[in-house]
Amino acid sequence: MRPHTHNTIRENMLSRIQSGEWALGDKIPVETSLAQEYGCARATVNRALQSLADQGLLIRKRKGGTRVCKLPVRYAKFEIPVIREHVEALGSVYHHKILDMKLSSSTASIRERLRLDTKDKVLRVDTLHMADGHAFAYEERWINIAAVPAILNAPLEQISANEWLVKEVPFSNGDVIFSAIGADKTTAKALETHIGTALFTVERTTWSLDEFITTMKLYYKEGYQLRSRL
């Protein structure tokens, strides 16, 4: 039997809602029970539940569990992309390279984003995402070690921090900022462009309940276009 993916689990859960097995307003089983039922990691279940919540079909509350919406509505939300999947969907071969990785104290701005104390450590990971051997996006990421201690043993040379976190670490909320930022010396070198070139940039911070997980900046090579659906 093939292992369940978050997509197959989401479709199964949607079927349970549509069939009335999970009626409007019902509280559904907790993530650990669902993970055991589907024979998968809790993070996979979390991702499926979050997808249904993003569609306005579920309501997730801290300490209140997850319930089927009494009056389902649709929300506009931004799904965290796995960059490898994005590149491969474009028909290109994906590869990533870690340019720098170190455990360090956080700067004042990172402490503010992740709600950390001065003594708290973060893992800084700078990654170059490539498509067909050429620069696609440059990522600067800071990970809260206290929230995700397993990241220290994650095989980040084989799987990017982006993909590992999406697959392994459940999150409940996040905020995203889109902007155009002129390339500085570091980003220009990584993305093989000129200093000052306008780069489409995503800044994102995610957390689970009251524990902040990671914050990052992702700079796309010039010419990148963001596509979304309503």
Image: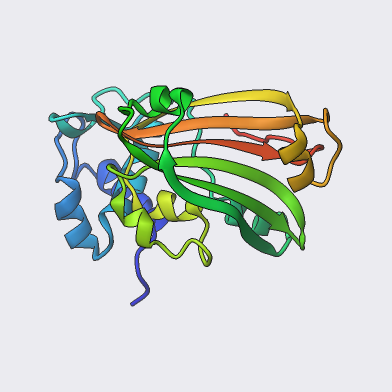
- Hey, which residue is sitting farthest right in the picture? 194
Q: Does residue 152 appear in the picture of this structure?
A: yes
Exactly how many numbered labels are in the figure? 0
- Above or below: residue 93 compared with residue 209: below
- Above or below: residue 186 compared with residue 9: above
Relative to 19, is 202 on the left or the right?
Answer: right
Q: Does residue 9 appear in the picture of this structure?
A: no
- Is 23 in front, or is 30? 30
- Is 163 in front, or is 6? 163
- Hey, which residue is sitting farthest bottom in the picture? 1
Measured from the top left, where is residue 107 in percent x and y? 46, 29
Relative to 198, is 83 on the left or the right?
Answer: left
Measured from the top left, where is residue 226 in percent x and y? 68, 34
Relative to 93, is 141 on the left or the right?
Answer: left
Q: Residue at (18%, 61%) from the top-left corner?
A: 37
Q: Residue at (17%, 61%) from the top-left corner?
A: 36
Measured from the top left, where is residue 13 in percent x and y? 29, 48
Quarter where residue 20 is shown: top left
Please say which color scheme the image uses.
Answer: rainbow
Image quarter in which the N terminus is found:
bottom left
Image quarter in which the C terminus is found:
top right
Q: Residue at (14%, 45%) from the top-left corner?
A: 29
Relative to 63, is 116 on the left or the right?
Answer: right
Measured from the top left, where is residue 156 in percent x and y? 48, 61
Q: Residue at (60%, 33%) from the top-left corner?
A: 229
